[in-house]
Image (cartoon, helix red, strand yellow):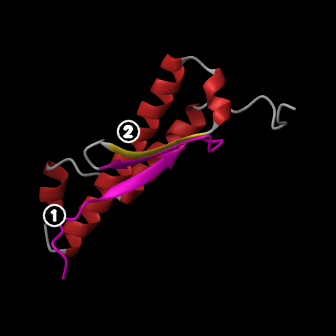
Amino acid sequence: MTDSTTTVVSAISGTRSGSVTVRATEHGLPIAIAIDERELRYSGSALAATILQQCTRASAGARAQRRTLLADDGVPAEVLDRLGLPTLARVAADANDDLAEDVAPTSWLKQV
């Protein structure tokens, strides 16, 4: 049996195109960032906003994983709710909402 309170939990989130991916802990600490060189054509503030958005999404996924670990250890659902830990279903629904609001690329062609 593992100790679910000391296990480091992280998750990955990426942009629709996969040009920016972030692995973050449940506390929002980014532990790995991958940026495709295509993203460097945008301003620094736009890239920073994208990284922060992906960090937030990854953090939510990690918090849902923490909830699952604690639930498996017998922590009641009402306690997990009071801790503010989302369910995997809630994280998936939020991701779908974010994708619905996300602007789709105007072209799938790559610049030559």
Residue 50 falls left or right of residue 72: right
Tag 2 residue: 56
Q: Which is nearer the eye, 53 or 91?
A: 53
State yes or no: residue 21 in magenta: yes
Q: Return the disc, 1 or 2, that comes first in the chain's sequence.
A: 1
Tag 1 residue: 6
State yes or no: residue 33 in magenta: no
Residue lying at the far bottom of the rendered structure: 1
Alpha-carbon span between mark 1 and mark 2: 21 Å
* 59 relative to 100, above or below: below
Q: Residue at x 38, y 38 (%)?
A: 56
Q: Which is nearer the eye, 60 or 21?
A: 21
Q: Are marks 1 and 2 in contact (CB under 8 Å)?
A: no
The residue mark sitting in front, 1 or 2, is 1
The boundaries of the magenta stretch are 1-25
The local crowd at label 2, few if under 14, some if 14 to 19, many if 20 or more residues have their Cα within 10 Å, is many
Q: Residue at x 57, y 31 (%)?
A: 101
Can the viewer see residue 103 in this picture?
Answer: no
Residue lying at the far right of the rendered structure: 112
Q: Residue at x 31, y 50 (%)?
A: 25
Q: Secondary structure at mark 2?
A: helix
Residue 15 figure quarter: top right
- Relative image position of residue 97 (x, y in whole percent): 51, 39
